Image (cartoon, grey):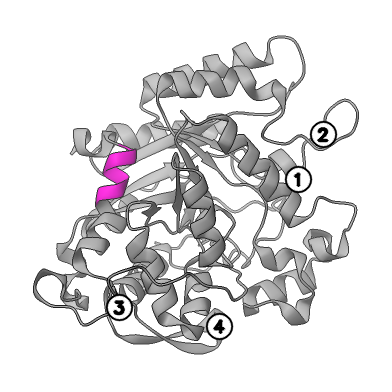
Amino acid sequence: MKQPLLLAALSITLAGCAPAANGPSAALSGPDIPYTQADFGRIPKIDAHVHANMYDPSFLALVRDNGFQVLSINVDYPDFPSLDGQAEVAHRYFAEDAGLFQFTTAFSMDGFETAGWSSRTNARIDRELAAGAIGVKVWKNIGMVERNREGELVMLGDPGFDTVMAHIEQRGVPLIAHQAEPYNCWLPLDQMTTENDRLYFQAHPEYHMYLHPEMPSYRQLMDARDRFVEAHPGLTLIGAHLGSIEWSVDELATFLDAHPNAVVDMAARMSNLQYQSNRDRDRVRDFLIKYQDRVLYATDLTLSPLSDAAKAQNPPIDPGADFAQAAEEVWRSDWTYLATPESQYVDTLNADTPGLALPRSVIRKIYYENALRVFPAFAQAS
């Protein structure tokens, strides 16, 4: 199957997390002996962040053959098909095999601040939940693109969202929030920590926030997001892409401690953890053990039609990429890093990276049990 593979930008700067008590990096024994490569196909797994934007009958076979279930996330992203188009594809996969495929919905910002926007948005959310959606996604256009009548950027805590957010909370589904960008976006090229970010922002300075001081800072965007999470303690929030705190497990720990209603997914940010663990393996390993209930395995793998009008991606869409091969490589590489002690070469870091060999009980939570808790529909549909 020849399809494009899109992976979101990967970035990091060094930081860490204090070791957990009782020495989680000590020698393991018994049931916590690390998994091996041979265990990959035998362990149930959920990839909690993919984008299946086009129908291909072999996609579900690929998921099944690798021992996965997937959560496909619809998103108000101009380079993707329309929200209605994404929903149509999701409904088709879901009808074919709900045990393997679940999906979330999203809403458009068109007409924000006009009469009836909240009621129309809630009606759309209700229609999609009735069709099987199990969550709602908001994208970084809130905070970085959309502007109100005064020309100010609209943040997630804008009162115009109050009715919609209250409705999402009342419906009892999570909100998946992609806020801000990787921290590298605000750094000079020579300080970026992954090669793909450096090449991308060098070629596309219009997206390089370091060159655009008129835009909000990274900290301003994170503070706005944090105020929103604090204001909605009854809403389960999933911080996509490690909550855009991919650069520091210490800072991520602080966020999780402050917001018990939040979890994070790993989508497209594995190399950020690898960058940090290459400098202090125990720090990253201890973080994942301590916060083993708060992290969801996810990749951001994207199966999407090419478009001549699409903006440049990071890394660029490769029209010749074999999606099945690329997906399996990502899944296997992540398993090697998280579940085994094996070392592998990571292209975006230009470095060998030893595996974390997380205890089996932690792997089962990150790969499966946490997603079942946050999205119980996976268990109900199996």
Give the residue number, with chain letter if any, for mark 1: 144
Q: In terms of depth relative to the viewer, which is nearer, 273 or 229?
A: 229
Give the residue number, with chain letter if any, for mark 3: 25
Give residue 156's position: percent from left, percent from top: 67, 35
- Position of the N terminus, as image quadrant, is bottom left
Tag 4: amino acid: Leu
Mark 2 vs 3: CB contact within 8 A: no
Element on which disc 1 rests: helix
Give the residue number, with chain letter if any, for mark 4: 349
Residue 194 against residue 147 in the figure, above or below: below
| Separation of marks 1 and 3 at Cα, in angstroms | 40 Å
Q: Is residue 152 visible?
A: yes
| Separation of marks 2 and 3 at Cα, in angstroms | 47 Å
Tag 3: amino acid: Ser
Tag 1: amino acid: Met
Which one is earlier in the sequence, the residue at label 2 or at label 3?
A: 3
Dot label at residue 147 = 2
Q: In terms of depth relative to the viewer, which is nearer, 168 or 347?
A: 168
Region in magenta: 369-375
Tag 2: amino acid: Arg
Give residue 168's position: percent from left, percent from top: 49, 23
